Image (tube, rainbow, N blue to C red):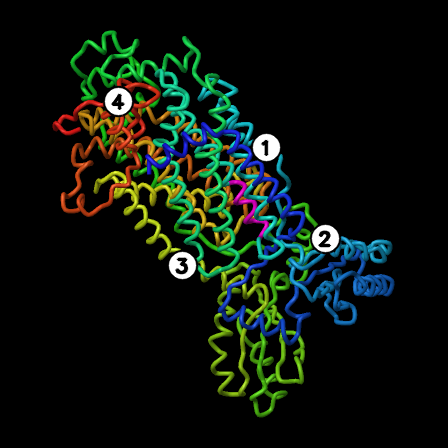
Amino acid sequence: MASLLHRLGRGSFRHRRAVLAAWLLALTAVITCVIAFGGTTDDEFTVPGSPAQTAMDTLKKELPSAAGTSAQIVFVAPAGHHITEPRYARAVSATMAEAGKAPQVVGVTDPVQGKVISPDRTTALGQVRYQVTRAGLHDDSLTSLEGTTGPARDAGLTVRVGGSAYGSGKSTGHSKELMGAAVALLVLTITFGSLFAAGMPLLTAVTGVAVTLLGLSALTGVLTISGTASSLASMLGLAVGIDYALFILSRHRSQLAGGMGTEESAARATATAGSAVVFAGLTVIIALCGLAVVRIPFLTVMGVGGAAAVLVAVGVSTTLLPALMGFAGERLRPRPGSRAARREQAAHGEQAGRPGPSARGEEGQRGGHRDGSGGSGGHGARGTMGERWGRIAVRRPLLTLSAVLIGLLAVAVPARDLQLALPDNGSAPAGSGQRQAYDLVSEKFGPGFNGPLLVLADTSRAGNPRAATATLVQDLKAADGVAAVGEPQGIGHGGAALIQVVPDSGPSDDETEELVERIRDEATGWQQETGAKVSVTGTTAVNIDVSARLASSLLPFALVVVGLSLLLLLLVFRSVVVPLKASLGFLLSVGATFGAVVAVFQWGWLASALGVAETGPVVSILPILVMAVLFGLAMDYEVFMVSRMREAHAHGATPREAVLAGSRHASRVVTAAALIMFAVFASFVPGGSTMLKPIAFALAVGVLIDAFLVRMTLVPAVLALVGRAGWWLPKWLDRLLPDLDIEGERLAADAGKGGSDRDGPGLPVAIGGAFTQDRPRQDGRR
């Protein structure tokens, strides 16, 4: 892989104008496709094959108005008055008549005639039906509906419009995402010590995000793509795009500081750091595409959209970035005497067997340290911050391991209470009209009126269809958890009936799910007794089925992800301990992340500070989606940390020296990458939609936990504790596994034979993320 990427990096550098033109052409092409084919996004959940979805599909054919979305108009009388007073009743009826003329409306229910009045007679609830789903509503349909409430408002009534047609709120704009990009620019500037160098990862990441989002927009005209999928793709594309470019550009500047030529440095950086980027990107792509096994189109589109963003980010980082390196030329080389130059030159001096300028003091003269690191392994008397952190972790590895385990397990404890559901208007922003309507309905009528169930009774084979329907209605009224049962509505030629059932509980409450299951359990008995085939559907029932399928898929998906991580890391590091440690660390990160999500979004800790409008069940897609994304990011950091350690150990360092070498050289880049990831994900929390907010929070927290506690603390402690056993692999397995050359060792061999045509035979070559002279290993092999 490294050899292929070496050629790709060199080719992109040499033909930089053609590469830049190709990406500009790609941008132009997707913009043209958006104009020609672009449509609208669709956030509708479907779960093909489920009982609720099957019944809903039947309704769409037989009674489209019942299968479409709906809106609610809530009328509240002034204090001290009743909604049934003649002047208010006339205003309500006049408003509902106007609502019936609004665009796309196929029917309304006048609450005065239908007697949908609250027990205290202060509130009336009108129903507006559409023949299309929420995604099929025109942009101005709901605005036009709100404009029909004039007669009621003129009469002094308080009017709120809501219902499932509104959804639970959308993102409030892109200003927060720009804040995340600004934080990323600050971190990059500090990392590189150059504003010019810091701008390159942002430029390439924004280019990749633009191509991805425009491509998704172009596909909305022919495919069902959700707005959440676009937001996720934007979030992932920006985060990984910056990080991948950071890894490669950091390697390039490090090589330039060591004296390497610009063209060869770009090729080597693309080959070595680029190999890890490709590996990390593939893990994210595979995990996200694996979401298709859940068989929920909404989630599949989110996974594929996110995977597309990562794929484009990898492509941009390995082609456009080397081309930009070519345009930048010598301007990326750290200036002599600058902090970046001194740091890199000191590191190169140590790796070549020469103590760096700061390593020639007292510590460099001592034979070793009590922690076993050795004088040449330290980066000066104090060392880099990453090395000092590594020394703390390995000084008492068992104590470090115990402390991290106890801390992460404690944070993961709330995850036992994780509850899953799909968002409704109860979690919409507090000041929104749909949230106010939701709260009024819950207060005056009961929470079940916000999410009624639809019971479809196929009486075509019943001996007496009317009697069968009447029996069913009576049984439903007597069922536990039922607040009200509406009048049956005939479908077609009377061969079926639709009955509205209002639960005592809200749409996302456990009691509502239990009611759905009880009705389905009784369906067999009703069919035997009356001949009617009964099924439960409606938006609430479909959402319950979606959540159930997601919950049942979580464990199999986790096993697949963990198994995949074991296999991939086994191939990369050719070690038994490293994959096991990485997988267990990933599970710890996920558990702690879920615990933090429960504490904030269910228990309400820091909820107001984070703009959480309502605590309650977490969006159902969060666990499986967060696991997929965090898996790839965790493997990303694992590769960049452990590859440094493996390279040092392969060239004679003791286990602790190898750990400190990895901490010294990789911690700075991993820290910057994690902070950038955190900033981008966290920027989506304040202004994110109800569905996106907890996902962004989980990813932000998960990145911090995995990078700083697991990869930079737990990993060094474990490898120091197990010693040389950490790099053990059975010989029979070593012969069976293919050599992927992730770390570019073949490049080192080629350089040792003949050297580079640009840099000469004596130049250090990049292996496993570090630089070393091509010298014999301790075992005598090359």
Task: First in sequence, mark 1 or 4: give its number.
Answer: 1
Of the residues under marks 4 and 2, which one precedes in the sequence? 2
Name the residue carrying label 2. Answer: 139
Q: Viewer-proximal residue, 392 or 470? A: 392
Type of amino acid at the residue the image marks with label 2: Asp
Q: In this view, does 413 lie above or below 186?
A: below
Residue drawn at 42 percent across, 39 percent down? 702
Q: Of the residues shown, which amino acid type is indicated by label 4?
A: Thr
- Residue tagged by mark 1? 178
Outermost residue toward the left in this view: 779
The residue pinned by badge 3 equals 553
What residue is shown at x 52% (from left), y 51% (from top)? 616
Q: Distance between the residues labelled 1 and 2?
A: 26 Å
Marks 3 and 1, Cα distance to the nearest angstrom?
Answer: 35 Å
Callout 4: few (<14), some (14-19), or many (20+) C-alpha neighbours within 10 Å?
Answer: many
SS for dot 4:
strand
Residue 569 % position (x, y): 28, 42
Q: Mark 4 points at which residue?
A: 772
